[in-house]
């Protein structure tokens, strides 16, 4: 498939009619459009998207309604009673037919504002034979142009538009019209696997409208038992259809949640340093609160202790003098600790010592007790002076305790002040406008929603499998109940044949899909290495054809890296589209030579349209990538800066060259063909 012409009228930066005729030459298959920055290169790429899909690529943070399709110079000259037309027309060919897509909108001005509103819009498509280009057949549009959209999607899969309409300057945008690409489905179209899926859908996988289901409706049974079986089967089939619709809805929910999770993860990664500062800030605040409470507690303890014991501190000189006096007069202590004269008197009156010895007049026991009595107060002051010394020493220790409490207060104040200074330093480094806790809560909510949807999807799949098993059992019972007549036998044979064909196609599809996936994974890594001299990294495809870039680890093996630079994203996706182009080209050659193992008719190769493709690549990689493209694609169309063209080395492949001209005093641009002779 090749683009032949692109015609624009009043589209965005281009005033009036501008036309480009693309080179379809096999040897010189490159068309280059050169221009300076901001003159309208990307507008041409937008024209492709808008004409084919009715959508444009929006910048991050903008909606499609933010873009004005009608040229501003034309809009400025409109009054309230006049209209102006915008159209883009693309003609493409597969060497047998010419396909023309014409999308047009008529605008009115919301006068005197510098705004527009649609008067009418239309989408038309025509097909002609290459040998008779003037005899055109219009494609029936269908409701809301659905048939034309399906036809265009068969020629140029929308899910792959982000690749063959390659935007090297804005690769951060992943969706067209807010819809993420289903790459797997598009690869099936390009590799011919969609033919298998269409056949499977036609035979069995489209519910009541499938061939097998229609055949079954022609089989008639007799009796109430058969009717009950048929009702149960119909109910189970409806349950299966309901579950399948719920699964489709859940798939959309899971896809949306995963997309939101990816956006939040990228956002958090981009602001990781700020979040770490916020965590440090919150920790510092918590420490300061604890230190403030500790300071107040230490201060209260010190004040209470001081108020209760200050008199002991003031009495210290008197106590020291008293102790010196006590030590000078106090002899050796001979008393029994804590004993008093009243205790001795009580023992004497009782007539018996606590050891059991009788106490009689003139006895030795009485003599010992009376001697001990003389060592006790008030006869002897030794014990009282000993107690006084203990108390004095205890009072002297109060000063040390108060000094220790005061030191705790000083330490807590110093720690508090140091952390306040640290908090001020963190505040200077960060802005607290971003609430990461809300972002993480949102991320957790989307993950939980995706997990819940996945669990529900699993339950529905189990229910479908259970119902299908019950349907098979019911069908066996229905066969036993069916009247054995020739008509039923005829339809039964048709059903068995259709089931056998379905099983064969399904098995072939699975086998070929695995083979293609294996070939793609090998080829995409080979192309990546060839174009980017990548030694420490590789790329691979998941089962859904999502592209992963992996880095070699120090311990061996590879790990996926999700936070890629813009240049790495471009490199990764270049390798993918080159692999698709090369695969399609080789399969087409095999089919044309009669060596293909699958009929590739209707699944032609894609051209590749590149807008600023090399802006994020180094000079060496520009040359490596650029010289691969004309070899793997039947047609290359590139819009780029004049200053970067010399690095590509593509002059020998150029079949048509155009220049975008814009005068400094004009607000619109025009396209001029360059004579390369």
Image (cartoon, rainbow, N blue to C red):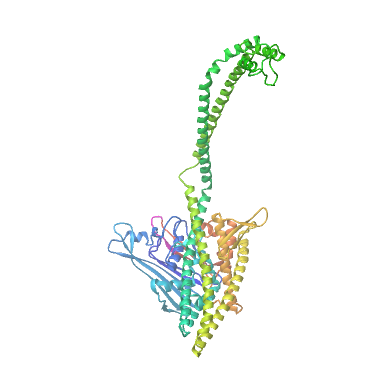
Against 480, residue 376 (above or below) is above
Let me know if residue 675 appears in the view: no
Q: Nearer the viewer, residue 284 or 14?
A: 284
- Magenta segment: 664-671
- Name the one closer to the observer, 207 or 471: 471
In the foreground, 619 or 507? 507
* Residue beneath the point at 61% across and 65% down: 521
Q: Quadrant of residue 594?
A: bottom right
Q: Is residue 627 left or right of residue 333?
A: left
Dividing the picture into quadrants, the one containing residue 558 is bottom right
Q: Residue at x 50, y 75 (%)?
A: 205
**Magenta stretch containing residue 666, yes or no?**
yes
User: Taken as a whole, is the magenta stretch helix, strand or loop?
Assistant: loop
**Position of residue 172 measured from the top left corner of the image (x, y, whole percent):** 50, 57
Up the image or down, 96 lies above or below 79; here it is below
Is 529 a magenta residue? Answer: no
Q: Position of residue 182 (x, y in %)?
A: 51, 66
The x, y position of residue 341, in whole percent, is: 62, 14
Residue 293, visible in the rendered structure: yes
Query: Looking at the image, is 467 positioned above or below residue 321?
Result: below
Q: Is residue 90 above or below residue 429?
A: below
């Amino acid at each position: 498939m090749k683009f032949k012409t692109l015609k624009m009228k009043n589209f965005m930066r281009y005033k009036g009619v501008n036309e480009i005729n693309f080179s379809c030459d096999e040897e010189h298959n490159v068309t280059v459009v050169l221009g300076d920055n901001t003159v309208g290169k990307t507008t041409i790429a937008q024209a492709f998207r808008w004409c084919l899909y009715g959508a444009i690529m929006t910048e991050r943070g903008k909606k499609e309604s933010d873009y004005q399709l009608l040229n501003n110079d034309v809009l400025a000259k409109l009054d309230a009673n006049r209209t102006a037309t915008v159209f883009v027309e693309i003609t493409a060919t597969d060497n047998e037919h010419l396909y023309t897509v014409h999308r047009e909108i008529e605008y009115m001005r919301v006068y005197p504002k510098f705004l527009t509103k649609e008067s009418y819009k239309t989408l038309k498509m025509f097909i002609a034979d290459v040998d008779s280009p003037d005899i055109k057949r219009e494609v029936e549009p269908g409701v809301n142009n659905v048939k034309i959209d399906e036809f265009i999607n068969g020629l140029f899969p929308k899910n792959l538009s982000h690749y063959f309409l390659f935007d090297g300057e804005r690769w951060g945008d992943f969706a067209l019209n807010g819809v993420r690409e289903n790459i797997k489905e598009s690869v099936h179209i390009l590799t011919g696997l969609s033919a298998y899926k269409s056949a499977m859908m036609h035979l069995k996988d489209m519910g009541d409208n499938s061939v097998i289901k229609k055949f079954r409706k022609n089989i008639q049974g007799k009796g109430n038992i058969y009717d009950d079986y048929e009702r149960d089967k119909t109910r189970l089939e409806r349950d299966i259809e309901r579950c399948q619709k719920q699964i489709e809805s859940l798939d959309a929910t899971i896809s949306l949640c995963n997309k939101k999770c990816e956006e939040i993860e990228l956002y958090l990664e981009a602001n990781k340093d700020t979040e770490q500062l916020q965590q440090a800030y919150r920790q510092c605040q918590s420490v300061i609160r604890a230190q403030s409470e500790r300071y107040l507690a230490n201060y209260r303890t010190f004040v209470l202790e001081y108020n209760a014991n200050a008199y002991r501190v003031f009495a210290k000189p008197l106590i020291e003098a008293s102790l010196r006096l006590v030590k000078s007069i106090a002899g050796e202590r001979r008393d029994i600790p804590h004993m008093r004269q009243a205790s001795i008197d009580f023992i004497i009156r009782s007539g018996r010592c606590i050891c059991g010895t009788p106490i009689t007049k003139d006895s030795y026991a009485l003599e010992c007790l009376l001697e001990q009595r003389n060592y006790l107060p008030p006869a002897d002051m030794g014990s009282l002076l000993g107690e006084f010394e203990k108390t004095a020493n205890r009072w002297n220790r109060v000063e040390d305790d108060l000094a220790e409490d005061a030191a705790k207060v000083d330490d807590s104040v110093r720690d508090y002040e140091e952390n306040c200074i640290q908090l001020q330093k963190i505040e200077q480094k960060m802005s607290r406008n971003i609430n990461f806790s809300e972002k993480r809560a949102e991320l957790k909510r989307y993950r939980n929603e995706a997990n819940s949807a996945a669990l529900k999807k699993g339950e529905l799949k189990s229910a479908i499998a259970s119902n299908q098993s019950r349907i098979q059992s019911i069908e066996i019972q229905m066969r036993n109940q069916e009247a054995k007549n020739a008509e039923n036998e005829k339809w039964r044979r048709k059903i068995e044949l259709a089931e056998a064909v379905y099983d064969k196609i399904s098995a072939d599809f699975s086998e070929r899909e695995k083979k293609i996936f294996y070939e793609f994974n090998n080829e995409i890594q080979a192309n990546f290495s060839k174009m980017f001299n990548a030694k420490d990294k590789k790329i691979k495809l998941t089962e859904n054809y999502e592209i992963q870039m992996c880095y070699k680890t120090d311990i061996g093996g590879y790990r996926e890296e999700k936070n890629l630079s813009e240049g790495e994203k471009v490199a990764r996706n270049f390798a993918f589209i080159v692999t698709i182009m090369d695969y399609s080209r080789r399969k087409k050659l095999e089919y044309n030579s009669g060596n293909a193992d699958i009929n590739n008719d209707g699944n032609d190769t894609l051209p590749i349209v590149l807008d600023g493709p090399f802006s994020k690549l180094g000079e060496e990689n520009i040359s490596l990538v650029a010289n691969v493209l004309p070899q793997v694609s039947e047609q290359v169309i590139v819009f780029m800066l004049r200053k970067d063209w010399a690095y590509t080395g593509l002059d020998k492949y150029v079949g048509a060259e155009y220049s975008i001209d814009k005068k400094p005093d004009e607000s619109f641009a025009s396209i001029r063909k360059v004579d390369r002779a």
